[in-house]
Amino acid sequence: MCNLGEAIEQNGIQKGIKKGRHTTRLEDIQAIRKNLGYSLEQAMDLLNIPDDERSEYLTLLQKQLEA
């Protein structure tokens, strides 16, 4: 049972790290767009965001704009 609890805890930690990383990168993308006048694609290129993660960031940015 102890291993199950540890696995659940580790899963929660990993989700928190991922969420924190996304928040930071979203802020970075927005700052690059605002301060440097770059497009979303250019900002993501500058941050070396992999192609397979870009749609996720676009979705998160869209949700922020709708809020």
Image (cartoon, grey):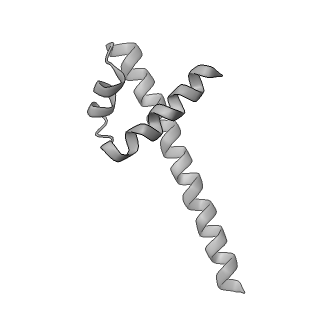
Left/right placement of residue 24 relative to residue 13 reads left
The correct choice, above or below, for 15 with respect to 8 in the image is: above
Task: Give how far across and how far down residue 36 sits, in percent.
Answer: 32, 15
Where the C terminus falls, by quadrant? top right
Location of residue 14 (image quadrant)? bottom right
The correct choice, above or below, for 27 with respect to 14 in the image is: above
At horizontal 67% and vertical 80% (from top left) the residue drawn is: 4
Left/right placement of residue 43 relative to residue 13 reads left
At horizontal 42% and vertical 38% (from top left) the residue drawn is: 55
Location of residue 8 (image quadrant)? bottom right
Location of residue 53 (image quadrant)? top left
**Residue reaching furthest to the bottom:** 1
Task: Give how far across and how far down residue 41 sits, in percent.
Answer: 31, 27
At horizontal 48% and vertical 37% (from top left) the residue drawn is: 24
Frontmost residue, 57 versus 47: 57
At horizontal 57% and vertical 20% (from top left) the residue drawn is: 65
